[in-house]
Image (spheres, coloured by chain):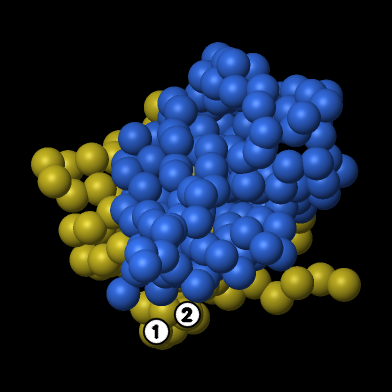
Chain colours: A yellow, B blue
C-alpha cells in the first residue's frame, strides 16, 4: 500500500506538536549544527527539508523551518548520509 | 526506624553525542533514587565496562545509539548477546533513524527500538518507554521511587 506523503505546504499548516510527531516518525536525520548556545537539527521529510532550531536541545523548540531548497543542506553537508537519503527516496 | 532505599538499578548508555548523553542523564535524574545511569562515548567503552563488571546483578537496561565510532550500536548489541551474563538483559537501540531495517535488526537481537525525541513531551515518553523495557520488579521499584 502506498503511504500518503505530506507536502511541504501541508506540513507548514500542522501544529508544532504534529510537525515533531511526523518528523520523529518519518523524518530522515541529516545532521546537527551548533550555533553558539543554540543547536539545530536537519531532517529530510519525503521531498523537502525541515530544520528544527532549539534553544534547549531536544527540549524546547525555538522554531521550525521548511524548505525544498537544497541551500538548507549546506551547513550539514559533511554529515549527509547518502545511503539513508537514497533509501528514503526509494520507499515511496 | 529508618526505611532503607532499594539497591539502585544500573542503566548503561552508549552514545557519541555528548548533548544526547547529557539530555538522557538529566531525564533519568527523576529516578536518581533507584537508577544509576552510567554513560559511554562508544560501544567499546560500554563493553569494556561490562567485561569488568561481570557480577550479579546485571544492568537492568542497556541503551545503545546506533551510529558511534570505534564500535557502533548494532555491533555492540551483537557482542552483548554473545555474553552469557548479558544475553537476556533488556536492551534498546536509541537512534535518529526511522528505518524499518534498523527496527528489524533490533528485534532480531531481542532489543527495543526507539527514535530519539524532538521535544520535552517526547523525551518524557521515551524515558517511560526505557523503563518499560526493564523487568517487572525493577520497573515497579523505579516508578515507586520516582522523585517529585
Q: Is residue A3 visible?
A: yes
**Residue B55 falls in which quadrant of the image?**
top right
Left or right position of A79 against B44 = left
Residues at discs 2 and 1 both on one chain: yes
Residue found farthest to the front: B1
Q: Specify few, some or many for label 2: CA neighbours under 10 Å numbering under 14, 14-19, or 20 or more.
A: few
Q: Residue B35: give x, y in percent of width and height.
A: 46, 51
Q: Residue A23: give x, y in percent of width and height.
A: 51, 64
Q: Quadrant of the C terminus of chain A?
A: bottom right
Q: Is residue A9 visible?
A: no
Q: Identify which residue, B67 or B36, lies in the foreground.
A: B36
The tag on residue A59 is none
Q: Residue B26: give x, y in percent of width and height.
A: 32, 53
Q: Is residue B143 above or below residue B28?
A: below
The tag on residue A18 is 2
Q: Is residue A91 above or below residue B102?
A: below
Q: Residue B20: give x, y in percent of width and height.
A: 39, 44
Q: Is residue A21 above or below residue B42?
A: below
Q: Identify which residue, A20 or B94, lies in the foreground.
A: B94
Q: Quadrant of the N terminus of chain A?
A: bottom right
Q: Secondary structure at mark 1?
A: loop
Q: Chain of mark 1?
A: A
Residue at (32% x, 44% y) in the render: B22
**Residue B101 falls in which quadrant of the image?**
top right
Residue at (19% x, 58% y) in the render: A55
Q: Which residue is mark 1?
A: A15
Residue at (51% x, 49% y) in the render: B7
Q: Identify which residue, B71 or B25, lies in the foreground.
A: B25
Q: Identify which residue, B3 or B40, lies in the foreground.
A: B3
Amino acid at each position: 500500500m502506498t503511504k500518503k506523503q505530506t507536502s511541504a505546504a501541508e506540513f507548514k499548516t500542522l501544529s508544532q506538536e504534529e510537525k515533531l510527531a511526523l518528523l520523529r516518525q518519518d523524518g530522515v536525520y541529516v545532521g546537527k549544527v551548533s550555533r553558539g548556545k543554540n543547536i539545530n537539527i536537519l531532517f529530510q521529510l519525503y521531498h523537502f527539508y525541515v530544520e528544527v532550531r532549539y534553544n534547549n536541545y531536544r527540549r524546547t523548540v525555538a522554531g521550525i523551518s521548511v524548505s525544498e531548497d537544497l541551500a538548507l543542506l549546506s551547513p550539514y553537508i559533511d554529515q549527509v548520509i547518502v545511503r539513508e537519503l537514497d533509501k528514503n527516496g526509494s520507499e515511496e | 526506624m529508618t526505611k532503607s532505599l532499594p539497591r539502585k538499578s544500573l542503566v548503561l548508555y552508549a552514545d557519541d553525542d555528548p548533548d544526547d548523553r547529557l539530555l538522557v542523564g538529566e531525564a533519568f535524574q527523576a529516578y536518581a533514587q533507584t537508577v544509576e545511569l552510567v554513560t559511554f562515548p562508544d560501544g567499546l567503552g560500554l563493553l569494556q565496562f561490562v567485561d569488568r563488571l561481570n557480577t550479579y546483578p546485571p544492568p537492568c537496561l542497556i541503551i545503545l545509539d546506533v551510529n558511534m565510532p570505534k564500535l557502533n550500536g548494532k555491533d555492540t548489541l551483537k557482542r552483548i548477546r554473545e555474553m552469557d551474563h548479558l544475553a537476556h538483559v533488556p536492551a534498546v537501540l536509541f537512534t535518529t533513524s526511522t528505518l524499518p531495517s534498523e527496527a528489524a535488526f533490533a528485534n532480531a537481537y531481542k532489543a527495543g527500538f526507539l527514535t530519539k525525541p524532538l521535544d520535552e513531551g517526547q523525551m518524557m515518553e521515551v524515558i517511560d518507554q526505557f523503563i518499560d523495557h526493564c523487568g517487572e520488579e525493577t520497573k515497579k521499584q523505579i516508578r515507586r521511587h520516582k522523585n517529585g
